[in-house]
């Protein structure tokens, strides 16, 4: 016993000494990327956070992929963009052809029946994929081409071609080896006409536990899952022979260079920055402005790191609850817009790395952006004038009142925002300072996210400061601003027949020239009505080690394309 | 304590555990925001559903989670017209009944986020938390004893040290942990320790290297916890020790010729440690609950982070499981503390 204790201490000391190498040696084959959160669920049909989305896009392929460069969708598994044909007023036939080179891991080709299988899974009752079922419910049926096993036609409701192809295609050979779902059609599954068959399949699908074991549904993407330690890290390995390697000049969407990708979950930004500086991380995207600026000013860090900023489609807004008596008049909302000092706000919270906009369309989208509208300026005198035009009168006490003497409405506002977000808080504080100077009492309400979400839906907020995400390829504002979405996702409560009409026309039109006219008109209407005001569009900040070479950055989350990073070869020792 | 008293004591403890768990279940479920489940998912993937789709999908989700049935056996309501309070009986088809039946079978349900059994999620988080908190607890206790004994022989230093410890005690954990990180894991100062996690899984290490590696990666998180825990313990134990040293039996011991070291270690310290037994009921639940701040800062997916994330995502089965576990450990710690008191102090035994 007396010898055992020193022995144990010696062993511990030896193992401690052998482990004391904080900075792992840099290898060209592995790229280590920071994630703020774990994917949590990797079922390819349940993608509900950016980490899961990034992983699924590396493990699986869809027919189409949203592309910033193309400002729309580009073919991925599809050989070309699909052809469309209107069947009647509501139904659209969308015909796809799958790339002939596309194969599964077992060497069998990716065929139209795999797409049919995926659609059947999406419509199978009893699976925990309700959101995907609702979202892709617009695909009513699939018709396989009897002559060509890679060709098929989707019967869809509406005009959205992108939705018909942006879901991961699942391998039938792995999930339904006996082809039991082949005997049932998509409409039959939707109508629940084969409950026994569907229940049996749902039981088998659930038993695979794809949420935590995505490797059980091997996709046709370039990577396979090596290890996933929940909450810690996720490692992907490039397939030794991926089908797109056969292409002589693969398009960007089919390029995959890194041998190994390791995503490290590091929730805290300061820790992630330290890890990047010490070489424990290779790439850190969506970096806070302060940390990014500090690194850029450090001589040692600029030697090791490269820095990128890219205009994103995410924007900060101040939304007015138009159902509130004080905010019903559009002149009042216009007046309050003049109390935000956007350039100062950009400097204070984003270190100058953001850009203002007249509306929810990014100024990068030049044809669609209405550049003839003036940017909202900080102008308290103009605000006073507009308030007076809206019928507000300043009382002897300095407060603003409107309405009859018996039932006066007091201009008193609350600003709600998610607690703990510095950029929201800065905007709220700035607004309060400007409003208070005019005699408008403003109460700040930093709120816990789920409580805030509840208050917003119930219409209990006055002004809400939050981030909204746009896209360069979708201009459907139904959920955000259409009167049919009031109380659901239209949190401003904005309801305007002219706006409804424009939103409906935008959804229906496919002609770019017409879309430009409608979008510009829509922006003008929003500038007049001001259900919300866009404060600025964010820039994504990416810092990475120089050994990674050129970083393909994008304005869409996560801000980079991991598969297209081509690490520089290590110098010969 | 044997026979009926033991049985009564066990029954009382079990009743307390049932009461706590039922209270937690009913409170958390009563505050569940049904629409937020869908909201979280749709916000995460950018898919926007129409109003009718949202209503339908929410209903499907509620059905899957078992939230579409009444919460309890009875629902109370008040009839506006008459002003009387009315109640409605739902029978066994209610959330509480189903949950309790599952609980008796040892099933804590599944996570709303990934469908994983709650027991599995908890054990995974505990595997990260327990090494950290156990190391911190052992380190704190060891350091406290050493420091108190050292101070007992150096009365001139005591006041300065106690002042310093009070200052340390006033520092919030996040500040202390960040300072340690910026001092000891910073390439600009001292890069002695790793910044996060437990190492890359791609780095294979031999079995004999595992303990050292774990210790190396846990040094900074453990040190953070030790530094915030030790001041409180030292102040209390030092106070108790000084109190004991003024007792007549100490004078007797000294008169019998015992050395000052022996007087402190064999006579005063034993009695001074008695009040710290009460700290056991605090220490054990904290071992299980983890340390959210440290786990977030050092990227360790332990119980603290699990509690915070499941609360933010309204993952109530996991939240209830984790909070229930902490509550049960607290009850168990109190039982243990009671038992220890009886063993250590004969006066309590005779009064029981």
Image: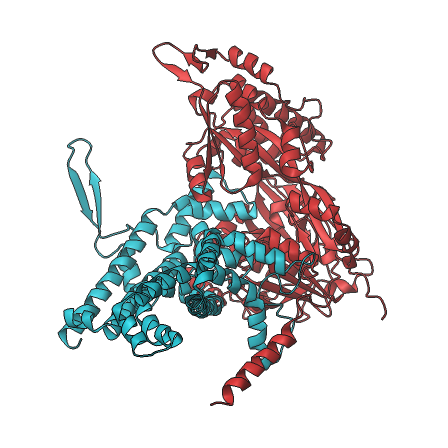
Chain colours: A red, B cyan
Q: Is residue A386 left or right of residue B84?
A: right
Which residue is depicted at the point 55% across and 71% down?
B215
Question: Residue A327, percent across and down?
Answer: 47, 22
Q: Is residue A400 visible to the viewer in this orientation of the structure? A: yes
Check the image and report above or below for B236 versus A557.
below
Q: Quadrant of residue A272?
A: bottom right
Question: Residue B58, percent across and down?
Answer: 42, 47
Residue closest to the far right = A572
Q: State the quadrant of the C terminus of chain B.
A: bottom left
Question: Residue B319, percent across and down?
Answer: 39, 57
Question: Residue B266, percent across and down?
Answer: 34, 76
Check the image and report above or below for B275 versus A76.
below
Check the image and report above or below for B136 versus B20.
below
Which residue is depicted at the point 58% across and 47% down?
A155
Q: State the quadrant of the N terminus of chain B.
A: bottom left
**Along the viewing direction, whichever of A242 and A19 lies nearer the viewer:** A19
**Along the viewing direction, whichever of B246 and B94 lies nearer the viewer:** B246
Which residue is depicted at the point 21% across and 54% down?
B91
**Along the viewing direction, whichever of B123 and A328 lies nearer the viewer:** B123
**Along the viewing direction, whichever of A521 and A542 lies nearer the viewer:** A542
Q: Is residue A115 visible to the viewer in this orientation of the structure? A: no
């Amino acid at each position: 016993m007396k010898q055992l204790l020193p022995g144990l201490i010696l062993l511990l000391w030896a193992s401690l000494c052998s482990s004391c190498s904080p900075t792992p040696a840099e290898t060209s084959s592995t790229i280590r990327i920071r994630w703020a959160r774990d994917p949590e669920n990797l079922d390819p049909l349940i993608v509900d956070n950016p980490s899961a989305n990034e992983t699924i896009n590396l493990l699986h392929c869809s027919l189409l992929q949203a592309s910033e460069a193309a400002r729309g969708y580009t073919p991925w598994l599809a050989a070309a963009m699909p052809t469309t044909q209107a069947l009647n007023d509501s139904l659209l036939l969308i015909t796809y052809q799958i790339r002939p080179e596309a194969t599964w891991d077992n060497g069998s080709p990716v065929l139209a029946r795999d797409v049919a299988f995926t659609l059947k899974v999406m419509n199978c009752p009893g699976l925990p994929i309700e959101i995907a079922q609702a979202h892709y419910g617009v695909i009513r049926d699939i018709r396989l081409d009897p002559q060509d096993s890679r060709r098929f036609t989707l019967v869809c409701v509406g005009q959205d071609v992108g939705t018909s192809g942006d879901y991961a295609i699942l391998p039938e050979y792995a999930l339904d080896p006996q082809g039991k779902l082949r005997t049932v059609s998509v409409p039959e599954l939707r109508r629940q006409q084969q409950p026994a068959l569907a229940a049996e399949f749902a039981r088998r699908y659930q038993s695979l536990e794809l949420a935590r074991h995505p490797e059980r549904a091997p996709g046709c993407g370039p990577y396979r899952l090596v290890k996933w330690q929940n909450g810690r890290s996720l490692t992907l390995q490039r397939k030794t022979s991926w089908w797109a390697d056969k292409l002589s000049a693969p398009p960007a969407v089919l390029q995959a260079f890194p041998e190994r990708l390791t995503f490290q979950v590091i929730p805290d930004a300061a820790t992630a920055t330290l890890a990047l500086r010490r070489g424990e991380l290779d790439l850190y995207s969506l970096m806070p402005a302060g940390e990014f600026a500090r690194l850029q000013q450090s001589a040692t860090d600029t030697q090791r790191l490269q820095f990128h900023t890219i205009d994103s489609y995410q924007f900060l807004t101040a939304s007015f609850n138009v159902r509130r008596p004080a905010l019903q008049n559009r002149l009042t909302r216009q007046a309050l817009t003049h109390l935000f000092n956007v350039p100062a706000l950009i400097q204070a919270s984003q270190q100058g790395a953001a850009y203002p906009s007249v509306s929810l369309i990014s100024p990068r989208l030049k044809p669609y952006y209405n550049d003839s509208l003036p940017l909202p300026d900080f102008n308290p005198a103009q605000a006073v004038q507009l308030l007076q035009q809206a019928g507000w009168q300043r009382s002897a006490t300095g407060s603003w009142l409107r309405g009859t003497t018996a039932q006066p409405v007091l201009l008193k506002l609350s600003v709600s925002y998610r607690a703990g977000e510095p950029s929201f808080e800065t905007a709220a504080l700035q607004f309060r300072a400007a409003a208070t100077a005019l005699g408008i009492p403003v109460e700040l309400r930093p709120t816990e996210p789920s409580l805030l979400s509840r208050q917003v839906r119930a219409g209990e907020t006055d002004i809400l400061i939050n981030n909204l995400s746009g896209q360069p390829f979708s201009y459907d504002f139904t959920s955000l601003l259409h009167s049919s979405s009031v109380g659901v996702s239209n949190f401003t409560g904005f309801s305007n027949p002219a706006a409804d009409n424009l939103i409906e026309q935008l959804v229906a039109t496919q002609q770019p020239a017409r879309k430009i006219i409608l979008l510009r008109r829509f922006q003008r209407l929003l500038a007049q009505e001001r259900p919300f005001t866009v404060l600025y569009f964010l820039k994504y900040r990416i810092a990475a080690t120089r050994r990674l070479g050129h970083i393909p950055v994008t304005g869409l989350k996560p801000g980079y394309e991991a598969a297209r990073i081509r690490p520089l070869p290590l110098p010969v020792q | 304590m044997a026979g009926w008293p033991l049985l009564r004591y066990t029954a009382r403890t079990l009743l307390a555990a049932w009461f706590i768990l039922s209270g937690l279940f009913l409170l958390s479920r009563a505050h569940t925001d049904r629409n937020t489940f869908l909201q979280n998912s749709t916000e995460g993937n950018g898919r926007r559903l129409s109003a009718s789709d949202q209503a339908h999908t929410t209903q499907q989700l509620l059905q899957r989670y078992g939230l579409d049935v009444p919460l309890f056996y009875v629902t109370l309501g008040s009839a506006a017209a008459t002003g009387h309070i009315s109640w409605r009986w739902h029978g066994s088809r209610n959330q509480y009944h189903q949950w309790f039946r599952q609980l008796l079978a040892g099933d804590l349900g599944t996570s709303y986020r990934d469908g994983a059994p709650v027991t599995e999620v908890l054990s995974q988080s505990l595997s990260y938390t327990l090494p950290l908190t156990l190391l911190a607890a052992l380190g704190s206790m060891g350091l406290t004893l050493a420091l108190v004994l050292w101070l007992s022989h150096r009365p001139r230093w005591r006041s300065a040290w106690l002042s310093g410890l009070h200052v340390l005690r006033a520092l919030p954990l996040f500040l202390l942990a960040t300072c340690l990180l910026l001092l000891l894991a910073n390439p600009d100062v001292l890069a002695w320790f790793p910044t996060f996690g437990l190492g890359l899984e791609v780095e294979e290490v031999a079995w004999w290297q595992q303990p050292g590696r774990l210790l190396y990666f846990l040094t900074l998180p453990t040190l953070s916890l030790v530094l915030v825990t030790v001041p409180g313990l030292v102040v209390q134990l030092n106070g108790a020790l000084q109190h004991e040293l003024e007792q007549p039996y100490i004078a007797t011991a000294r008169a019998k010729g015992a050395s000052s070291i022996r007087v402190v270690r064999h006579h005063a310290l034993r009695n001074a440690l008695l009040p710290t037994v009460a700290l056991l009921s605090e220490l054990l639940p904290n071992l299980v609950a983890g340390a959210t701040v440290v786990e977030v800062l050092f990227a360790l997916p332990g119980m603290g982070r699990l509690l915070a994330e499941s609360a933010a995502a309204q993952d109530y089965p996991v939240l209830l499981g984790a909070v229930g576990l902490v509550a049960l450990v607290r009850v168990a710690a109190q039982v243990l503390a009671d038992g220890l008191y009886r063993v250590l102090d004969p006066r309590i035994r005779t009064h029981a």
